[in-house]
Image: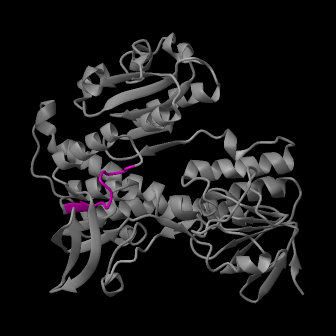
Amino acid sequence: MPKSFDAIIIGTGQSGPPLAGRLTAAGMRVAIIERKRFGGTCVNTGCIPTKALIASAKAIQMARRAADYGFRRGAITVDMPAMKARKDGIVAASNQGVEKWLRGMKNCTIYQGHARFESPRTVLVGDDALEADKIFIDVGGRAEKPAIAGLDTVNFLTNSSMMAVDFLPRHLVILGGSYIGLEFGQMYRRFGSEVTILEHAERLISHEDPDICDAIRKILEGEGVQVLTSADAREVAQQAGQIVCKMSINGEDREIEGSHLLVAAGRVPNTDDLGLDRAGIAVNSRGYIQVDDQLRTTVSGIWAMGDCNGRGAFTHTSYNDFEIVAANLLDNDPRRVSDRILAYNLYIDPPLGRCGMSEAQVRKSGRKALIGTRPMTRVGRAVEKGETQGFLKVLVDAESKRILGASLLGVECDEVIHSLLDIMYAKAPYTVIQRAVHIHPTVSELIPTLLGELKPLE
């Protein structure tokens, strides 16, 4: 006999736990299912642990630059076990915090195990059958395994298994030149590893504008990271304790030998083993659950949130998915995914802050637009801090005066981007922020200056 609940939530990433909190507060009996670690990717193998390691790498880099700031230091010794222990402590606090919150939640029952649909209203977890009229899927994603000959024969790493590394790889070869690959690449170069990044496209993070891609490549290569683009990896093999990657670069055969291989070639949703077909839930060709603008699947009474729905691949979009679902179900507030403005950061050093359209997208749209750019060498705060790499770029609709998008590459730009993002959500003209009086000395104070120097996009 199935155990009956008002709602079932599958997964404890950024959407599931807060939704459980809202539903139980509304008087519903909720079952929440987790097969591995509470908190999902962000807490355990994504944002939190990687940014903790990036903070260590930043501190190491600043210590190496001691002479630039007028003081002396001794030899830098990198303690990998100690850095891992610091990271693990931060992760544990978050992971345990989520679990404690759920276990103490009134009217919430936790099931630990692998969930599989038996029907549109029934989910199996081990020997338990659970049923509810409302089911929410929040199962996240994992590293994609590319179809490369020999990959199954080598001990490769992913963003998840990198979290167990407590040693310094001699030479880390990274397959993939997008966000995960670039962050780990700079990080481990700063730790002391030799690093080679292989990217099959002509540019790193090729969905960004060429000037951004080129600037990021210059930053990484300036720190000693080897970057190979247009690199078509064809085969990997383990030879004499090393990993050999065979590739073609613009038709020329090449080989790279490294001590360790990190595969960072994309993500896939964790939807292949949920029995979605038994519930009639449709997925697209890549396995992402199809949802409408309010995150409803093709089956009435079932929603999909977070990375598994293909409508966002970030912690902040997953949490916003929860907000959208809760607003529609509980608040009579018809929020939609289409209300969301694309925004994200790349946490290399200096970071890239992005929101809205790229320059290439604005050009493709054919609309009349204005553009403003400013190198970080002309930002006083960056000069004072001795961190002048990168530049600021903002695009504005010439007729409506609304901000279309921004690419901010530079010190503190992961925070500065929000000043533009908020104006975009307010649907206010750029003149609102252009006429604002920002505090000196900051990076943000140059945003009004930049917007006062807009020129037609030609």
- Above or below, 97 against 223 in this view is below
Instruction: Check if residue 222 falls in the magenta segment.
Output: no
Task: Find residue 296 and report its horizontal and vertical position in percent.
Answer: 77, 58
User: Looking at the picture, how far across and down is residue 99, in whole percent?
Assistant: 63, 65
Relative depth, front residue between 24 and 187: 187
Image position of 90 (left or right of 426) = left
**Outermost residue, bottom side:** 127
Rendered position, 326 above or below 84: above
Q: Which quadrant holds residue 332?
A: top right
Q: Is residue 203 magenta?
A: yes
Given residues 199 and 128, the one toward you in this image is 199
Q: Quadrant of the N terminus?
A: bottom right
Horizontal side of residue 433 vs 442, given as left or right: right
Residue at x 19% of width, y 44% of height: 63
Q: Quadrant of residue 423?
A: top right
Magenta-tinted stretch: 195-206
Residue 369 position, x and y percent, is: 49, 23
